[in-house]
Amino acid sequence: MYNEEIKERFLIKNKNKRGFLEKFEESERELGLDICQMSIPQAIATVETMNSYDMNTFYTVLATLKAYAKWCYNEGLFQDAPYGILGISVDNLNPKEFIKRMIFPTEQDLISELSSVQLIHDGYVEVIACIFAWLGIPDPLAIHDSDVFIEGRKIMADGVVIVDGFSDYVAQFLDEYKRLRSSTRENASCLIPVIKDRSVDTFIKRFCSPNSAKMGKPMDIRVIQSAIYKLNCKYVENGGESRFNYRNILKSGSLSRLYSAECGGLDVFDKENEEVVKGFFYETNYRSITWLYKRYKEAFNL
């Protein structure tokens, strides 16, 4: 840590704050300044280097940095410093560069980046799971064959419509997957034929060899999580950001649909529409949604 001796003294009674103080060591060393010694613009730029677009995360980090700054001041340290960190709030922060690197702005962008690291028409579970995430489906294995109405552009779960409308492109993609019966998979240095396990009724099905012990067994969510993790690792190896995770794709799709609704006349920032806006996301904090949405629009010049 920069100014390690000082920070270690603070951490004696704040041991759980170490990770927060370590996050900004690189910026502190580049500027040759402790976070307490930074001006407001310098403090804002430093905090924005944190890889996050979550308002609540920034709120927690700012609370820690301010507690450290107040402790330093009370200890008589950095008496001539501007203590800019004490003058900023989450409303001053705009991690739009990180948003641009992480968020998929359109389904076309998602599919394009998917296709750069995986065959998208061969029935891989991670591909369909990413499409489900974009559509706003929190649990991809909760969707059964009878829940997907491709012609009607609806997807249900437990008798409730959870996706009401999707593009022709996604419809074609889902229809192609539904009709797919066989494919191939890499095994060591060769390709082996595999078939879709149609004995299970989840829409997402594994492809395996006919005599596989996995045939006929329900898929565990960990199978999908592992497949998406490996997909993301491959994407990062190819020079991309670590953006292929279910939560990030869920957020991307929600932001895109909210923007479409705004273009259709919804006033996102009118508090009277709070419940409508929250309905696009699987969270209940209207302020954090609108905080991110405003910065999302700035990031993509919408």
Image (tube, rainbow, N blue to C red):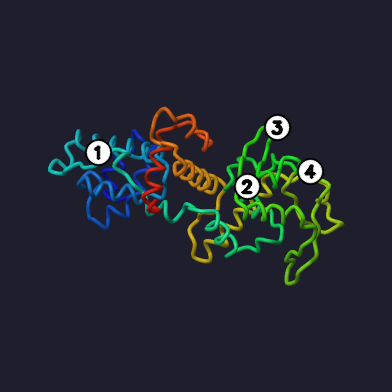
**Sequence-first tag of 3 and 1:** 1
**Sequence-first tag of 2 and 3:** 2
Residue at 24% x, 48% y: name it: 34
Q: Is residue 106 left or right of residue 24?
A: right
Residue at 23% x, 43% y: name it: 36
**Sequence-first tag of 2 and 1:** 1
Residue sticking out furthest to the left: 80
User: Are the residues tagged 1 and 4 within 8 Å (C-beta)?
Assistant: no
**How dense is the environment of label 1, judged by Cα within 10 Å: few (below 14), some, or many (20 and up)?**
many
Q: Amino acid at mark 4?
A: Asp
Label 2 SS: helix
The residue carrying mark 4 is 201
Label 1 SS: helix
Rounded to the nearest angstrom, the CA distance separating label 2 from label 3 is 17 Å
Image height check: is 203 above or below 56?
Answer: below
The residue carrying mark 1 is 69
The residue carrying mark 3 is 159
- Quarter-wise, where is residue 10 in the image? top left
Q: Which label was assigned to residue 206? A: none
Q: Nearer the viewer, residue 220 or 31?
A: 220
The residue carrying mark 2 is 132
Q: Amino acid at mark 3?
A: Gly
